[in-house]
Image (tube, helix red, strand yellow):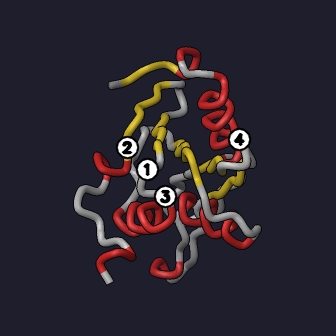
Amino acid sequence: MKTRIEELNPREAELVQAATEARERAYAPYSHFKVGAALRTVLGHIYTGVNVENASYGLTNCAERTAIFTAVSGGEREFIALAVVTENASSPCGACRQVMAEFAPELTVLIADTRGNVERYSMDELLPRSFTPDQL
């Protein structure tokens, strides 16, 4: 269900705003499709990420994974919510969803466009029957 950023609780609105600001730093010279992400940890820290493209497209890294990998590099492993902002509220790709499920199967995901529209999802909605460490 779509909502407006103004209708979110303050912590969610802050996360969407951080992703919106991060989006401006994306490196997308080939697709021109900028993505920003912001990840909140259980300790309350926010880690941001952007998509970073490469002339060899397979080496591109998505904003969502950049934010998660940055948080993990900072020593954090427990995440509460992730906001993703694109021009048209595009959903995270499958690789990002799998990484999100690895670290935070209970994660709340906020997907927003640049006009302030936001949708809220659970990981179960985004990636039902995900492959998790307990299946190994």
Q: Around disc 3, counting alpha carbons within 10 Å, would you say few (fewer than 14), some (14 to 19), or many (20 or more)?
A: some
Whichever of labels 2 and 4 marks the residue nearer the N terminus, that label is 4
Q: Around disc 2, counting alpha carbons within 10 Å, would you say few (fewer than 14), some (14 to 19), or many (20 or more)?
A: some
Q: Nearer the viewer, residue 83 or 104?
A: 104
Residue 32 in the image, given as x and y percentages of width and height: 54, 55
Disc 1 residue type?
Glu
Residue 122's disc is: 2
Residue 57 in the image, given as x and y percentages of width and height: 47, 77
Whichever of labels 1 and 2 marks the residue nearer the N terminus, that label is 1
Whether residue 76 sits left or right of residue 29 in the image: it is right
Disc 4 residue type?
Glu
Residue 106's disc is: 1
Residue 135's disc is: none
Q: Around disc 4, counting alpha carbons within 10 Å, would you say few (fewer than 14), some (14 to 19), or many (20 or more)?
A: some
Disc 3 residue type?
Ala
Q: Which residue is mark 4?
A: 21
Question: In the structure shown, which secondary structural element does the residue marked by tag 4 occupy?
Answer: helix
Residue 97 in the image, given as x and y percentages of width and height: 39, 61
Circles 4 and 3: CB atoms closer than 8 Å: no
Picture mark count? 4
**Is residue 93 shown above or below 124?**
below
